[in-house]
C-alpha cells in the first residue's frame, strides 16, 4: 500500500476560500457590477450580478422548502439552459438541499436508454423531486411512474416567483453539497458524494494554486455542460468561491458553431477557458482562417485541457490556426482530474504550455516509459504523451502496482491520489466505495483512480484506463492510442472510433469499430487493419464499419467501450461483411476480406 504522502486534512477547512458554497455566495451578495453572463440560444445575453444570483437562489431555496423539501433531501435537476440550471442548483444549495444534476435530452432518440439512466440516477439518489424545464419535460415525464421515491416533476420556470422570506438553514462544511453521478463510460453511473469541504478545498486548489486567478481582471468563458464536474465545478462553483465573473454559452451553440466560443472570449475579453481535446480539434478543423483574422485572443491567459486524453498534436494545430488571433500557446494548461476527487487532481505550472514526453511505444507495452533520444514524435515506434502536471498543496499523487506498492519514475501503474479534495465515496454503494477509496497504514485515504500512468519528477503522464487495456500475448495496448491512429484516416469520423479486446479461442484479440462518412466500407476496413498493423505490429481480429451515430457515447461525449463491446458480442453492431483476421502474430495484416 502506498504511504508517506502527507496527511489527509479532511477535518479542517482551507484558509483562502469560504468553508461552504452557501457562504461563498452570500459573501458575493454586495457585488452589483460583477456576476455571470448567460448567453441564450438566440444570442441575447442576460447579466446576472452576484447580488441578483444570491437573491434569486434564496428565493428558489424558499420555494423548495415551501414544497416540503427539507435540508438533506435530494432533488434531481434536468435543465439544459445554463441560466435556469445555475439558479436552480444554487437554490438547492442555499436551502441545504442536495442537487443531483442529470444530463438533459432534447429528442426522443434512444429514449428508452435515456429513461433507464434517469430512472437509475433518481432511484439511486432517492430524489423526491425532479426539476426540469418546459422544453424538456416531455422527455422526463415517463420516469415519474417508474420511481417510487419521486413525488413530483416541477418546471423551473414556476420557481422563484414568491419571496418566502429568510430561511433558517445552517449549511456546514461536512454537509453533502451535491451528488455528482459519473458519466458511465465504463459502467452504470455512480453517485459521488461531494461535501462543501471537498468543494472548498478543490476550488482553492485549482482556482488559486492552479490557475493563479486574479479577481481584479480574470473572467471565465465556458460552453461546458453544467451537469458534469468540469463545467459545474470549474466554472460555477470554483468562480463563486473565488469571486470570478463567468460568461456561459449553451453547449449546443458551441457544437453547432465552434467559432462562437472564440467570439465570446474575444468580445468579453475572457482570460480563462477550458475544454476537452475534441473541442480544440473541432476549432482547428472547422473555424475558417478569414474568421480567425477578425479575432483578438491575446486576452486568453489560461486555456485548460482535460476530461479526455490530451493530444499534443491537437494543441499544436489549434495554436497554429489561432496564431493570427494572437493566441499565446503558453496559455495551454493540461490537467488531470475526476469526479471522485471533486474535480482537479493535477495542473501544470501556468504559462508553461504543452510539454510532452516522447517514448518508445514497444517499451510502453511492457510497462516502461522509456524516453527516445531523438524526441521525434513522428518517428516510427514513437509515442507522445502530454505532461499533466503535479498535485496541489495538501494533496498527493502516486503510481502503484497491482499490490499497491509504489513504483519508480517511468514505471507504468495505477494512479492513486489523496488529500482533502478526495470524496468520501459513492452514495449508498459500500462495496464500490471500499474498492476505490482505500486507507493506508497511516490512515490516509487514497483514491484508486483506475487510470494507468507514470510519474517523472513528481509530474504525471496518463496512458489510459486500467479496465480498458487490451492485452494481446503479453503486450499491453491502450485503446485511445489505437483509436487516435484510426481517427486520423481519411473517411473515418474523427473521434468516433472504439477499440476493445475480446476473447477468441481462449486468447485476447483486438476489435476496432469505426463510424465512416461514406458507404465505401470494404476499402476502409483494409486501410484500418493495415494502419493498426503498421503502428502497433498488431493484427486486428475484426474491423467493423458502422454508420454515423451508431457508437454509444456517454452524456459527456466519451466513447462507451464496454457498451460497444457488448453490442458487438450481441451481434447488434452491424458486423455484416466485416474484415476478420487471425490476429495470430505481430506483423500479420489480418485484413483479408
Image: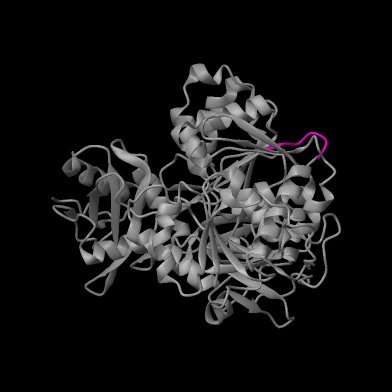
> Horizontal and vertical percent for residue 426?
58, 73
> Horizontal and vertical percent for residue 503?
27, 70
Look at 71% across and 51% down and name the residue there. Answer: 238
Q: Nearer the viewer, residue 80 or 135?
A: 135
Q: Which residues are magenta?
A: 215-220
Is residue 377 found left or right of 66 in the rendered image? left
Q: How many marks?
A: 0
Determine if residue 11 is in view. Answer: yes
Residue 488 in which image quadrant: top left
Colour mapping: one colour
Look at 45% across and 72% down and name the residue there. Answer: 147
Is residue 473 found left or right of 205 in the rendered image? left
Residue 373 in which image quadrant: top right
Does residue 212 lie above or below 367 as drawn?
above
Per the picture, the main secondary structure of the magenta-coloured stretch is: loop
Does residue 483 lie above or below 409 as drawn?
above
Query: The N terminus appears in which quarter of the rendering?
Result: bottom right
Determine if residue 327 is in view. Answer: no
Look at 80% across and 73% down and name the residue there. Answer: 11
Q: Nearer the viewer, residue 182 or 514?
A: 182
Look at 71% across and 83% down and name the residue there. Answer: 441
> Horizontal and vertical percent for residue 325?
60, 22
> Horizontal and vertical percent for residue 525?
22, 46
Is residue 551 found left or right of 584 in the rendered image? right
Q: Nearer the viewer, residue 311 or 87?
A: 87
Residue 23 in which image quadrant: bottom right
Does residue 46 lie above or below 70 as drawn?
above
Q: Is residue 17 magenta?
A: no
Amino acid at each position: 500500500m502506498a504511504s508517506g504522502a502527507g496527511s489527509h486534512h479532511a477535518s479542517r477547512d482551507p484558509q483562502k476560500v469560504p468553508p461552504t458554497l452557501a457562504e461563498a455566495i452570500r459573501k458575493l451578495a454586495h457585488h452589483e457590477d460583477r456576476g455571470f453572463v448567460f448567453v441564450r440560444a438566440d444570442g441575447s445575453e442576460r447579466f446576472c450580478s452576484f447580488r441578483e444570483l444570491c437573491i434569486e437562489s434564496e428565493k428558489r431555496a424558499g420555494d423548495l422548502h415551501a414544497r416540503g423539501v427539507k435540508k438533506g433531501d435530494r432533488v434531481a435537476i434536468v435543465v439544459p439552459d445554463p441560466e435556469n440550471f445555475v439558479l436552480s442548483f444554487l437554490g438547492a444549495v442555499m436551502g441545504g438541499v442536495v442537487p443531483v444534476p442529470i444530463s438533459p435530452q432534447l429528442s426522443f432518440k434512444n429514449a428508452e436508454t435515456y429513461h433507464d439512466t434517469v430512472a437509475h440516477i433518481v432511484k439511486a439518489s432517492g430524489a423526491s423531486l425532479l426539476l426540469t424545464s418546459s422544453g424538456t419535460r416531455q422527455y422526463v415525464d415517463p420516469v415519474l411512474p417508474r420511481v417510487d421515491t419521486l413525488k413530483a416533476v416541477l418546471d423551473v420556470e414556476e420557481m422563484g416567483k414568491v419571496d418566502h422570506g429568510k430561511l433558517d438553514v445552517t449549511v456546514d462544511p461536512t454537509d453533502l453539497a451535491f451528488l455528482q453521478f459519473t458519466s458511465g463510460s465504463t459502467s452504470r453511473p455512480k453517485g459521488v458524494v461531494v461535501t462543501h469541504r471537498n468543494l472548498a478545498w478543490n476550488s482553492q486548489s485549482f482556482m488559486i494554486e492552479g490557475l493563479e486567478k486574479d479577481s481584479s481582471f480574470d473572467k471565465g468563458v465556458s460552453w461546458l455542460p453544467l451537469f458534469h464536474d468540469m463545467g459545474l465545478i470549474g466554472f460555477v462553483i470554483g468562480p463563486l468561491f473565488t469571486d470570478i465573473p463567468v460568461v456561459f454559452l449553451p453547449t449546443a451553440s458551441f457544437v453547432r458553431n465552434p467559432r462562437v466560443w472564440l467570439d465570446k472570449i474575444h468580445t468579453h475579453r475572457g482570460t480563462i477557458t477550458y475544454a476537452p481535446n475534441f473541442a480544440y480539434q473541432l476549432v482547428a478543423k472547422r473555424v475558417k482562417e478569414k474568421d480567425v483574422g477578425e479575432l483578438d485572443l491575446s486576452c486568453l491567459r489560461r486555456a485548460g485541457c482535460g476530461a479526455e486524453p490530451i493530444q499534443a498534436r491537437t494543441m499544436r494545430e489549434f495554436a497554429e490556426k489561432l496564431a493570427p488571433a494572437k493566441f499565446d500557446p503558453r496559455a495551454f494548461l493540461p490537467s488531470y482530474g475526476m469526479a471522485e476527487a471533486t474535480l482537479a487532481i493535477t495542473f501544470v505550472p501556468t504559462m508553461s504550455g504543452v510539454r510532452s514526453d516522447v517514448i518508445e511505444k514497444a517499451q510502453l507495452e511492457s510497462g516502461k516509459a522509456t524516453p527516445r533520444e531523438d524526441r521525434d514524435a513522428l518517428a516510427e515506434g514513437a509515442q507522445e504523451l502530454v505532461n499533466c502536471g503535479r498535485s496541489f498543496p495538501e494533496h498527493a499523487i502516486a503510481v502503484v502496482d497491482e499490490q499497491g506498492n509504489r513504483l519508480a519514475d517511468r514505471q507504468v501503474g495505477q494512479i492513486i491520489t489523496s488529500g482533502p479534495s478526495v470524496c468520501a465515496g459513492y452514495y449508498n454503494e459500500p462495496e464500490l466505495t471500499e474498492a476505490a477509496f482505500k486507507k493506508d497504514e497511516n490512515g490516509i485515504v487514497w483514491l484508486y483512480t483506475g487510470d494507468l500512468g507514470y510519474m517523472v519528477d513528481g509530474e504525471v503522464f496518463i496512458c489510459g484506463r486500467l479496465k480498458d487495456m487490451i492485452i494481446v500475448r503479453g503486450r499491453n495496448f491502450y485503446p485511445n492510442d489505437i483509436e487516435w491512429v484510426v481517427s486520423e484516416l481519411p473517411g473515418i469520423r474523427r473521434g468516433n472510433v472504439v477499440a476493445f479486446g475480446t476473447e477468441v479461442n481462449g486468447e485476447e484479440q483486438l476489435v476496432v469499430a469505426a463510424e465512416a462518412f461514406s458507404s465505401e466500407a470494404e476499402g476502409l476496413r483494409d486501410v484500418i487493419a493495415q494502419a493498426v498493423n503498421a503502428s502497433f505490429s498488431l493484427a486486428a481480429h475484426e474491423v467493423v464499419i458502422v454508420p454515423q451515430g451508431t457508437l454509444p457515447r456517454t452524456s459527456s461525449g466519451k466513447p462507451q467501450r464496454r457498451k460497444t463491446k457488448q453490442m458487438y458480442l450481441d451481434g447488434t453492431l452491424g458486423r455484416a461483411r466485416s474484415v476478420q483476421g487471425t490476429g495470430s502474430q505481430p506483423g500479420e495484416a489480418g485484413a483479408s476480406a
